[in-house]
Amino acid sequence: MKQQLQELLKKYEFALSNMQSDSNLTCVSIESTAYFAGVTQTFNHVIEDLKDILESNHEK
């Protein structure tokens, strides 16, 4: 289980870094900008949740 969570965490962090550094993501409209901001925020929440889960499992 822990291994799966760590792999998932790596995938999310990798995807997030790709989204943030991808210069092809030139947002033309306000809607797309808001959408990508929302996706980025969701990714950050998921990453934090995964880290919390991993830490709490590690402490047990």
Image (cartoon, helix red, strand yellow):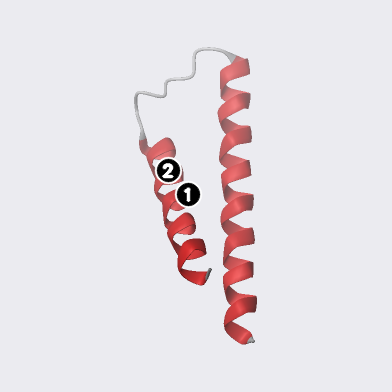
The percent coordinates of residue 33 (x first, y second) are 57, 23
Residue at the bottom extreme?
A: 60
Q: Is residue 2 above or below residue 14?
A: below
* Residue located 64% across and 60% down the image: 49
The percent coordinates of residue 10 (x first, y second) are 42, 57
Residue 12: which disc?
1
Looking at this view, is 57 or 40 the one in front?
Answer: 57
* Residue located 35% across and 23% down the image: 24
What's the residue type where badge 2 is placed? Answer: Ala
Q: Give the Cα separation between the discs numbered 1 and 2.
A: 5 Å
Crowd tier of the residue under label 2, counting other residues whose Cα lies within 10 Å: few below 14, some 14–19, many 20 or above: few
Determine the image quadrant of residue 59. bottom right
Regarding mark 1 in the picture, which secondary structure is present there?
helix
Regarding mark 2 in the picture, which secondary structure is present there?
helix
What's the residue type where badge 1 is placed? Answer: Tyr
Residue beneath label 2, please?
15
Residue at the top extreme?
A: 29
The percent coordinates of residue 22 (x first, y second) are 36, 32
Quarter the C terminus occupies: bottom right
* Residue located 49% across and 19% down the image: 27
Residue at the front extreme?
A: 1
Viewed as shown, does residue 39 lie left or right of 16?
A: right
- Given contact means CB atoms under 8 Å apart, are the residues at marks 1 and 2 in contact? yes
Determine the image quadrant of residue 41. top right
Looking at this view, is 26 or 53 the one in front?
Answer: 53
Q: Is residue 51 above or below residue 44?
A: below
